[in-house]
Amino acid sequence: MVEKDKDNRETFGVLFGDFAPGQKDSSDNPMMRSKEAAKAALPKRFYKEVSVGTEQSAEGETLYCVLLDGRKVKSPAKKTVCVPTQSLAEALVAEWDAQAKEINPAVMPLTRLLNSIVDGVEEAREAMIEEIVAYLNNDFICYPASHPERLVLRQKEHWHPVLDRAEKALGGRFVQASGILAIEQSPVMGERLRALWGDLDVYQLGALHSMMTLTGSALLAFALWDGFLEHDAVWNAAMVDEDWNIELWGEDEEASKRRAFRRAEFDAAVQVIKALRP
C-alpha cells in the first residue's frame, strides 16, 4: 500500500488485509475472500514505475522493498514490505508491474503472502510452531487408504519416501493407520522439528506454515525445506487423492479454478522457501 491518499490506504487495507495470519474469514477460504474483494470496484493502477528499493534493518542488514513511483509499498498494518533478497523483491516488482489497469490481489499471491508475513508472523511465532508440531499427529500422509490397490500403490510411491526421509531426519518412526481413528506420533519427532524450525526467520516460517496449510502436511513442507523433494514432486504428493478422484469422476470448472488458485499460493511459498533455504 502506498501512502498516497486516505482512499488508497483504506482500499489496500481491505484488499490485502484479508490475508493476515491468524485471521479467519467467513469461509476460511482465501480464494472466496479474493472473490468477495473483487466484487467491489478494484482500485485503478495509480503508479507508473515499479522498482526495487532498499532500507536497513534494525540489525544493520540490507533489506529490499518495492517502490511505486519511488514510494515504498506498505502492508495493511502500515509496515514497509521488505524482503531479505533482491530476487524476492524483483518477483514482487513483477507482480505489481503486471497490474495493467486495476490492482487485483487475487493474482498477486507473493504480495499477499509477504504482507501476511510482515504483519503477523513474529507475533504469532510460538502459536505457528505449535500448530506445525501438532500437524505431525494429523499429517494426512500417515493415513493411507486400504483400497483400491492402485490408489494404495500410488500413495505409497509418493508418500513412503517422504516418511522415510523424515524419520531419518527427526529420529523416530511414524505410525500409519487407515480409517478415521486418530493416531499419536512420538513427541521426540515433534521436539526435533521444533528445534529445527524454532529459530527460522519470519519469511521462512511464514512460507512453510502457508505450504503446510495448503497441502495439509507438515512432512511435505519439510521435504521441500530439507531439499529432499522439488516443488512439483511435493505438489503431486499432496494431490494424490484429489487426482484419483478427478480420474474417477472428472473435474468441474469451479474445482479447477480453486486448484489453480491454491497452486499459485503454493508457488509463492516455494519462491520464499527456495530463496532463503539454507
Image (spheres, helix red, strand yellow):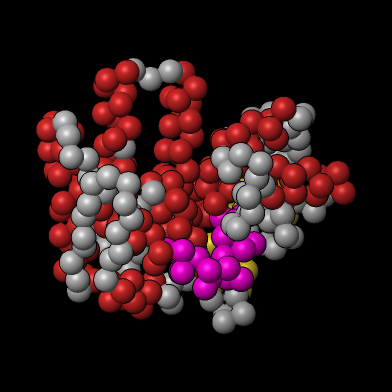
- Quadrant of the rendered structure where residue 83 is? bottom right
- Quadrant of the rendered structure where residue 15 is? top right
For residue 160, above or below residue 49: below
Residue at the farthest front position: 181
Residue 106 on image: x %, y %: 59, 36
163 sits to left or right of 117: left
40 sits to left or right of 201: right
Identified at 34% across, 76% down, the residue is 191
For residue 236, above or below residue 102: below
Looking at the image, can residue 275 be seen? no
Instruction: Assign the C terminus to one quadrant of the image.
Output: bottom left
Identified at 45% across, 58% down, the residue is 209
Magenta stretch: give its range.
114-132
195 sits to left or right of 268: left
271 sits to left or right of 189: right
Is 89 contained in the magenta span?
Answer: no
User: How many numbered marks does the figure carry?
Assistant: 0
Residue at the farthest right position: 6
For residue 252, above or below residue 160: above
Residue 165 on image: x %, y %: 17, 61
Front-most of residues 47 and 106:
106
Identified at 62% across, 63% down, the residue is 120
Is 131 contained in the magenta span?
Answer: yes
Residue 54 on image: x %, y %: 60, 64
- Quadrant of the rendered structure where residue 263 is? top left
Secondary structure of the magenta portion, mostly? helix
Residue 262 on image: x %, y %: 46, 38
Front-most of residues 54 and 155:
155
